[in-house]
């Protein structure tokens, strides 16, 4: 068990280092940041002084060392647009993104998994047909279109919720559904497929032949053995709803990191955009590591593989 956890932790560290190299290279390919931070009236002295402050006068390997050190200390530089430290701007917007991600994850799990189980149990029936229809709509409708349609119907026509912003508790409903609907469909199809494979196995037939109650067969034997693929996708879902909230936050003016990333891109605020990418990457890797740890407890065979 300990070797398995150490191995997964080392893989996560290597992944973060590889991402840091990519981010560092992409920041340099984008050009000299001083051309964005200074206007055309800045003289050569100011240009050189800012270069020394940013470490641009040092060799490239030393610049990368400074970049990695700043990552560990949380020093992501100054936001060009906000005129404040990048980490302060990110901390202000992070709670809204985590709140939306949690709501979307719960929506996709609590709706998609039960529908997948019911669809597999009632294969070919009306519930199975409804599940297929939900999956079709969820995986074919673009998220921005779905968000606009939900806003038009429930906010404009019916007036049940606010069309945008984060003023009330109910304001999170529409962006959470917009962000989580695709994962509802994916969870439904994955759980249905995994359950059907297990329900056709010999030990399930034996359990039914012994006269075990249907609920025991489904939840204790079938679902327990079919949980690995949905658990894998749950990690992907959680990482994706955290880092993929850009469209939903933009459509509903949700004040999170996704909307902040769009604003930073339009304002050419590269330090802020770079900080957001780093934070998103760190959260995604941490979620993947958490899922790997859960594997070892759900299925003991994995820790010895």
Image: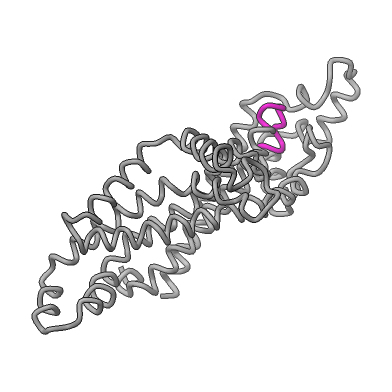
Seen in the image, is 150 located left or right of residue 190?
right
The residue that appears at 83% across and 23% down in the rendered structure is: 38
* Residue at 74% from the left image edge and 54% from the top image edge: 73
- For the magenta stretch, what is the residue range? 264-273
- Horizontal side of residue 100 vs 51, given as left or right: left
The part of the image, by quadrant, that contains residue 234 is bottom left
- The residue shown at (61%, 42%) is 277
Residue 199 quadrant: bottom left
From the top left corner, tell me how far across and down residue 183 is, in percent: 41, 49
Judge whether 64 appears above or below 221 on screen: above
Give yes or no for residue 265 being in the magenta stretch: yes
Task: Locate the N terminus and report the quarter of the image it occupies.
Answer: bottom left
Q: Nearer the viewer, residue 6 or 302?
A: 302
In-front residue for pair 13/245: 245
Residue in view at x 58 percent, y 52 percent: 100
Please state the horizontal and vertical placement of residue 127, each as a whole percent of the image.
25, 56
Estimate the x, y position of residue 288 in percent, counting from the top left.
47, 57
Residue 294 at what x, y percent from top left? 43, 69
């Amino acid at each position: 068990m300990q070797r398995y956890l150490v191995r997964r932790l080392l893989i996560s560290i290597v992944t973060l280092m590889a991402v840091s190299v990519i981010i560092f290279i992409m920041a340099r390919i984008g050009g000299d940041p001083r051309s964005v931070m200074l206007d055309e009236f800045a003289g050569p002295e100011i240009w050189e002084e800012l270069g020394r402050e940013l470490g641009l006068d040092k060799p490239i390997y030393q610049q990368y060392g400074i970049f990695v050190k700043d990552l560990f200390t949380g020093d992501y530089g100054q936001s060009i647009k906000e005129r404040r430290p990048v980490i302060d701007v990110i901390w202000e917007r992070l709670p809204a993104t985590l709140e939306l991600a949690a709501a979307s994850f719960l929506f996709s799990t609590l709706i998609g998994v039960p529908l997948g189980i019911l669809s597999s149990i009632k294969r070919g029936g009306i519930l199975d047909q409804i599940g297929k229809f939900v999956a079709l709509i969820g995986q074919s409708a673009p998220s921005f279109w779905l968000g606009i349609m939900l806003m038009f119907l429930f906010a404009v026509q019916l007036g049940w919720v606010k069309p945008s912003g984060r003023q009330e508790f109910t304001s999170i409903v529409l962006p959470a559904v917009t962000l989580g609907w695709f994962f509802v469909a994916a969870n439904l199809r994955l759980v249905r497929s995994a359950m059907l494979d297990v329900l056709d196995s010999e030990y399930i037939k034996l359990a039914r032949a012994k006269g075990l109650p249907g609920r025991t067969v489904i939840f204790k034997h079938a679902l327990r053995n079919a949980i690995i693929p949905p658990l894998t996708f749950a990690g992907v879902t959680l990482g994706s709803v955290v880092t993929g909230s850009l469209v939903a936050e933009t459509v509903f003016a949700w004040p999170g990191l996704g909307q902040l990333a769009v604003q930073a891109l339009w304002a050419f605020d590269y330090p802020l955009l770079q900080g957001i990418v780093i934070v998103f990457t760190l959260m995604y890797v941490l979620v993947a590591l958490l899922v790997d740890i859960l594997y070892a407890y759900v299925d003991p065979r994995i820790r010895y593989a």
